[in-house]
Image (cartoon, rainbow, N blue to C red):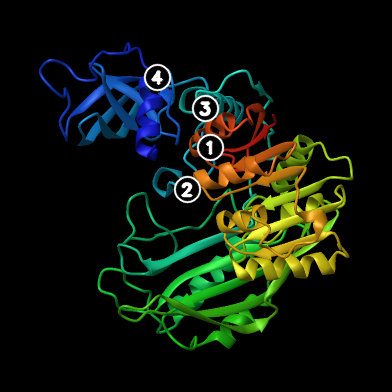
């Protein structure tokens, strides 16, 4: 099911339209672009938009909350719904609060800052249950309370800033406004980012404005500087930064490094050349300008090294909570063999290794496998093994006995799944079930695709037993869910 269908289905379910009734009136759609109308909001749809209706016709609008009376401007009208802009909150919800960020109205990065955090948690819990029960047709499972973040601010450990020019023509480093890939708005504060990250952004912007370097223009395909990536470690309080451009060398890089070195904890600056040629894949060439190319993060008792672009959960504090939740679901007693599928840089596998007999990680990205093996050695973990390969094909090779594995790794007691947002291929579900583990723990940042996969697992003899939502991304509509499956 497409994301737009999931959102629409949720909206219809949480409206007073009975099954079989039309979403439009006998005269057709009751709204037209440009119309201003007052509506009452009935729910927050999966994905974060508010749901209202004009004579039973569904309208989506960002920024409104359930129970509010609001004035909206109709922007676009489609066959089954319309999209609108919030003009005025006439009767506010008791759950509405004042967003602390000055950029909230224009940024779009954390859409739920105006919603009280307790209400955010309740909404996310309900949406996970709703996805599983309606999209997956799942029932009889236990729903654990959502795992919350004690202090839900300044938690992002990595950010990619865009580079462009503001309406006055000044060079700026910031974010794209919603729906505007060709525009960049300057960011002077962000309540999801640690303050040292904002400080790095400001220094790089000052340097860029004083230079002759031009931001890359996606319309005219001119200029050079694409984006600025910054990674921050909570555990070691260190920072890496990298600039991506079209140039083979970054002019003025030494001066920029000198300025950034003044920030406490800043340990490395790199430059990546983006090479694009007609009819050829995009290539990248990275050179270290100053300092080191890795930082260290704490995960439980582990000390893990990550490069600037390596994948790691963007909320370091809640990564510990997420993995502890997965460990609880796995019910490890110390003698189990665990398969960690889509293992990435091996953070889950290494986190669980001390409580297992052996753990096998399978990942298709070679640099991630290299990071996993390096971190295993650095933490003196000898029972974690990592295989480079596509999960679907590698599972087939294991089941057919064609992959050279030690005997102790060929049969899992527990399988951990943490796939991309798109979920699992049907053959992966079938092959995991064919391996006959005692338990399957499925971690997902997209409960809508997870629900469909869980339905397939149920058909294969692995029904959903419990689910625990984890709030990895406070003040956004995004939610992580840890599901336990067992025969």
Of tags 4 and 2, the one toward the viewer is: 4
Q: Which image quadrant is residue 310 in?
A: bottom right
Q: Which of the marked residues, 2 or 1, is nearer the chain's N terminus?
A: 2
Q: Position of residue 207 (x, y in %)?
A: 50, 78
Is label 4 in a helix, a strand or a loop?
Answer: helix
Q: Is residue 294 left or right of residue 172?
A: right
* Structural distance between the alpha carbons of marks 2 and 3: 20 Å
Is label 2 in a helix, a strand or a loop?
Answer: loop
Quadrant placement of the N terminus = top left
Q: Which mark is residue 13?
A: 4
- Mark 2 lies on residue: 109
Q: Which of the marked residues, 4 or 1, is nearer the chain's N terminus?
A: 4
Crowdedness of circle 3 by 10 Å Cα count: few (<14), some, many (20+)?
many
> In the image, is residue 166 above or below residue 399?
below
Q: Which image quadrant is residue 78 in?
A: top left
Crowdedness of circle 2 by 10 Å Cα count: few (<14), some, many (20+)?
some
Q: Which of the marked residues, 4 or 3, is nearer the chain's N terminus?
A: 4
């Amino acid at each position: 099911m497409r994301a737009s269908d999931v959102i629409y289905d949720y909206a219809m379910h949480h409206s007073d339209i009975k099954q079989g009734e039309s979403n439009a009136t006998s005269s057709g759609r009751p709204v037209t672009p440009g119309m201003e109308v007052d509506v009452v909001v009935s729910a927050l749809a999966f994905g974060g938009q508010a749901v209202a209706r004009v004579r039973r016709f569904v309208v989506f609008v960002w920024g409104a909350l359930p129970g509010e009376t609001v004035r909206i401007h109709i922007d676009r009208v489609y066959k089954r719904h319309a999209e609108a802009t919030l003009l005025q909150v006439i009767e506010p919800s008791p759950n509405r609060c004042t967003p602390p960020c000055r950029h909230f109205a224009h940024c779009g990065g954390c859409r739920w800052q105006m919603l009280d955090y307790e209400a955010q948690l309740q909404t996310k819990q309900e949406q996970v249950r709703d996805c599983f029960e309606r999209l997956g047709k799942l029932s009889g499972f236990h729903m654990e309370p959502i795992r919350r973040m004690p202090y839900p601010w300044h938690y992002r450990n990595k950010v990619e800033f865009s580079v462009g020019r503001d309406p006055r023509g000044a060079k700026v480093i910031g974010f794209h406004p919603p729906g505007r890939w060709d525009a960049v708005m300057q960011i002077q504060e962000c309540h999801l980012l640690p303050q040292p990250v904002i400080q790095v952004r400001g220094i790089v912007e000052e340097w860029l404005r004083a230079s002759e370097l031009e931001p890359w223009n996606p319309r005219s395909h001119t200029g050079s500087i694409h984006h600025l990536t910054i990674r921050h470690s909570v555990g070691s309080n260190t920072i890496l930064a990298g600039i991506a451009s079209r140039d083979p060398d970054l002019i003025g890089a030494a001066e920029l490094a000198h300025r950034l070195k003044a920030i406490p904890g800043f340990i490395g600056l790199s430059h990546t050349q983006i090479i694009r040629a007609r009819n050829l894949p995009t290539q990248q060439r990275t050179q270290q300008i100053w300092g080191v190319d890795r930082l260290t993060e704490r995960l439980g008792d582990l000390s893990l090294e990550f490069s600037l672009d390596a994948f790691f959960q963007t909320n370091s504090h809640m990564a510990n909570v997420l993995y502890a939740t997965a460990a609880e679901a796995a019910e490890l007693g110390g003698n189990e063999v665990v398969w960690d599928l889509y293992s990435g840089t091996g953070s889950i596998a290494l986190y669980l290794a001390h409580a297992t007999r052996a753990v096998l990680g399978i990942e298709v990205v070679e640099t991630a496998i290299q990071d996993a093996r390096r971190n295993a050695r650095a933490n003196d973990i000898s029972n974690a093994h990592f295989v480079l390969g596509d999960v679907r094909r590698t599972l087939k090779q294991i089941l057919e006995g064609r992959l050279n594995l030690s005997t102790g790794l060929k049969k899992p007691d527990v399988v951990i799944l943490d796939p991309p947002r798109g979920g699992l291929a049907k053959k992966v579900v079938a092959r995991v079930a064919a391996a006959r583990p005692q338990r399957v723990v499925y971690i997902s940042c997209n409960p809508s695709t997870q629900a469909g996969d869980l339905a397939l697992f149920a058909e294969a003899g692995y029904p959903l037993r419990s689910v625990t939502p984890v709030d990895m991304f406070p003040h956004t509509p995004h939610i992580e869910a840890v599901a336990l499956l067992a025969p």
